[in-house]
Structure formats: C-alpha cells, structure tokens
Amino acid sequence: MVSVARSFVKSLALCVLFVLSFAVSPVLAAGDAEKAELVTELAVRDSVMALRDSACTVEKKALRSDLELERAKCENWEQSYNTLKKNNETCAKALSVAIQASQEQAEKQEAKEKADKEKDKSDVVMQSASMAASFGLGMLIMWLILD
C-alpha cells in the first residue's frame, strides 16, 4: 500500500514538472528563467514533501492498525488465560473432593472388613465353645446314666 502511494505521488510530481516546464518555457524571457527555475524547484520540493506526507500517513495508519490488532490479541489472550485459570481451579476442587470421597470409602471398606473378620473370629470361638460345652454336658450325662 505504501509503494502504491509512493508511485502515485512520484507520477503526480513528474506530471506537474512536465506541465510546468512546457507551460512556462515559451512565455518566459531570459530574466524570467531564474524565476521559472525557482518555480520548478518549488514544485519538485512540494511533490517530494507530498510524497513523504502520504507515505507517513500510510505508515501511521498501518501502525495504528497493527496496534489495534495487538490490543485485541492481548485482550483475547487475557480472557483465554482467565477462563483456563477458572477451569483449572474448578477441576482442582473437583479432584480434591473425589480423592477425599475415595479415601473415606476406602476407610469405610477397611473398617467393614475388619469388623467382618472380628465377627468371623468371634463366631468360630462361639461355635467351638458351644461344641465343647455340648460335648462336656453329654459326657456328664453319660457318666450319670452309666453310673
């Protein structure tokens, strides 16, 4: 875009010089040659300055456009970061709750297994004691009967 503006301004400057050189030369006399040269120099300077002004304007617009684009990217990245941060915190909380629930369930399972083992043990002891008592009572009754 800058090169198009530069070429346009260059073409415009050359056209102005060309027109001035043909329009001024037949009318001017020898004393006016100095004035014509000054006018030509002024036209060249004005065209060069116009070219520089247009190039600066185009560059200024391009830089503003780039700046706005970078600002929009920054805002987008900041919003994405905040969203990711919020999601990470939510996931961390959910993971913490899940780990805690899993640990509590494991502790309950251990307590249940321990209680079951103790119950089985006490059942075996009770059965053994009951059998020994029955055997002892049966022996006592046999001794009383046979005696």
Image (cartoon, rainbow, N blue to C red):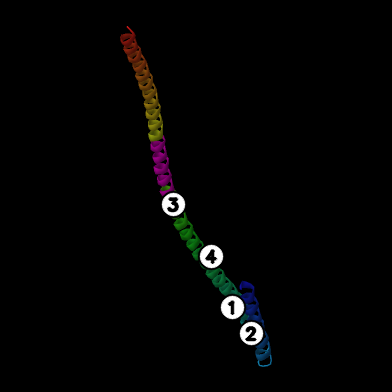
| Circle number at residue 46 | 1
In 3D space, how far apart are the residues under numbered discs 3 and 1 (Cα atoms)?
Answer: 61 Å
Residue 20 position (above or below residue 128)? below
Residue 41 position (above or below residue 61)? below
Which type of secondary structure does the marked residue at label 4 adopt? helix
Q: Residue at x 59, y 78 (%)?
A: 46
| Circle number at residue 120 | none
Which mark lies nearer to you, 4 or 1?
A: 4
Give the residue number, with chain letter if any, for mark 2. 16
Q: Quadrant of the N terminus?
A: bottom right
Which region is colored magenta? 90-106
Give the residue number, with chain letter if any, for mark 4. 66
Give the residue number, with chain letter if any, for mark 3. 87
First along the sequence among labels 4 and 2:
2
Q: Quadrant of residue 48?
A: bottom right
Foreground residue, 109 or 96? 109
The prevailing secondary structure element of the residues shown in magenta is helix
Residue 121: image x %, image y %?
39, 23
The tally of labels here is 4
- Give the farthest residue toward the front: 146
